[in-house]
Amino acid sequence: MYRRTTLDNGLRVLTAEMPHTRSVSMFIAVGAGSRYESSDKAGLSHFLEHLPFKGTRSWPTALAISEAVEGVGGIMNAATDREMTSFWCKVASVHADQAIPVLLDLILHPLLDPAEMEKEREVILDELRMTNDYPAQVCDLLLDRAMWPDQAMGRDVGGTSETVAAIHLDDVRSYMERQYRPNNTVIGIAGATTHADALNMVATATAGWEAGEPLGWEPVSVTVPGTGRVFVDRRETEETSICLGLPGFALNDEDRYAATVLNGILGDGMSSRLFQSLREDRGLTYDCHSSISSYRDCGALVVSCGTEPSRAVEAVAATQQEIAGLLNPAPETEIRKAREYIKGRLLMRLEDSRSVAAWLASQELLMGDITTPDETAANIDEVSPRDVVRTAERLLDGQAFRLAIVGPHDDGAEFESALTAI
């Protein structure tokens, strides 16, 4: 169970008491991400996420910040996505009052030193170069461009080397002034603490933090695929990386639970249809899997795999065949297996205080409401074979497949033909 308190400045604080644990985790979710950026400032949210770790008012160096948390055995990190930037830490409960103020200082009092910003710019550019060296990651980014061309949803969250090079300190300060406001932030705290203690710690640290009017996010522009659904990045690799995607479902879609079960049947786990077909039966790949992602107004179903280049077209055709098979009602035993798999993974994940803190803060920020693990499990249990078929019909309506290929292939013509075969 959880408790929610909204402070006078609009900051929402959610806590879950887990007295059986010996840790406390804090997860800060800010409404900042690539969907809030203009194309010429792509990567601004991610750049800003890095900078507080270079020094804050009370911990003025990167070393001081690290030592304050790692020195008591804790861990901390941050991440930027399309709709949210998060900062989190997890520490032994006896050290929570020492480590958690460090995390709060990151978002409240970063120094944003110009010299440190220039050093971190080079770190971020190296991060982008590193991503470009991994074909599977390039393939993911390529599919995003295919799914959502010429818009924020289709851009790399980290930006490009050109846009990162052009970001100035004034851009960072201005963006932080708009987005890092209490009414655009949610804090989740979970573990061996009480709501009163957690709330007191947050309220004291955030006193004087004033509400503001944040920027809006860019809605998705729907495109109807025709030709040109295949994006190819030619590279002399030993393996072809493949990502096949379909437009999916938004966070509040009525079929979101059925889509989760559908994904469990299709490609989540070693007993899924894709793994059994592509790996065990056909020997096409070492690893293949599907995933569901959901955002405020859109989503995607993505299948990822790697295969020997000469068998890449075969792998695409086999993947489509398995997706098309979802239009036929699955046996109740398979539905039951998928439901239990999903619930089991969820409940095991939420034994961790950090996962619980993230669960609370993320849902509150993006949806404005919390679905508890028990409620989620109950919703999963209600999914029937008919629900899965209906969801598959929605996914396949118009056969809006997009395909990204990274490997030794000159163009997408042979893959385009494979896509139109279904």
Image: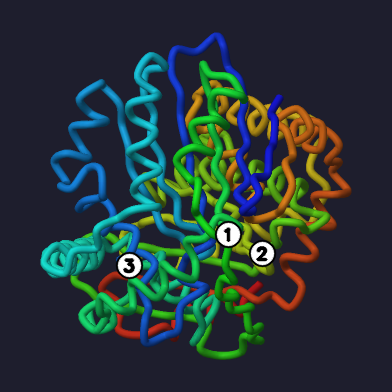
Q: Secondary structure at mark 1?
A: helix
Foreground pick, 243 / 2: 2
**Amino acid on which the number 3 mark rests in the picture:** Val
Q: Secondary structure at mark 2?
A: loop
Task: Give how far apart the Cα atoms at labels 3 and 2 are.
Answer: 24 Å
Residue 11, given in percent of the width and then of the height, sits at 60, 49
Pointer 1 and pointer 3: residues touching (CB < 8 Å)?
no
Question: Which quadrant: the C terminus?
Answer: bottom right
In percent of the image, x 63 and y 78: which residue is there?
Answer: 219
Report which residue position mark 1 lands on. 184
Name which of mark 3 and mark 2 comes first in the sequence: 3
Residue 199, given in percent of the width and then of the height, sits at 57, 32
**Amino acid on which the number 1 mark rests in the picture:** Asn
| Horizontal arrangement in the rendering, residue 147 relative to residue 85 (left or right) | right
In percent of the image, x 42 and y 80: which residue is there?
Answer: 231
- Residue 410 visible (yes or no): yes
Task: Give how far apart the Cα atoms at labels 1 and 3 are.
Answer: 32 Å
| Horizontal arrangement in the rendering, residue 419 relative to residue 113 (left or right) | right
Pointer 2 and pointer 1: residues touching (CB < 8 Å)?
no
Frontmost of labels 3 and 2 is 2
Q: Secondary structure at mark 3?
A: helix
Name which of mark 1 and mark 3 comes first in the sequence: 3
Badge 3 crowding class, 10 Å Cα cut-off, few under 14, some 14 to 19, many 20 or more, is some
Report which residue position mark 3 lands on. 138
Residue 122, given in percent of the width and then of the height, sits at 13, 67
Report which residue position mark 2 lands on. 296
Frontmost of labels 2 and 1 is 1
**Amino acid on which the number 2 mark rests in the picture:** Arg
Badge 1 crowding class, 10 Å Cα cut-off, few under 14, some 14 to 19, many 20 or more, is many
Foreground pick, 340 / 185: 185
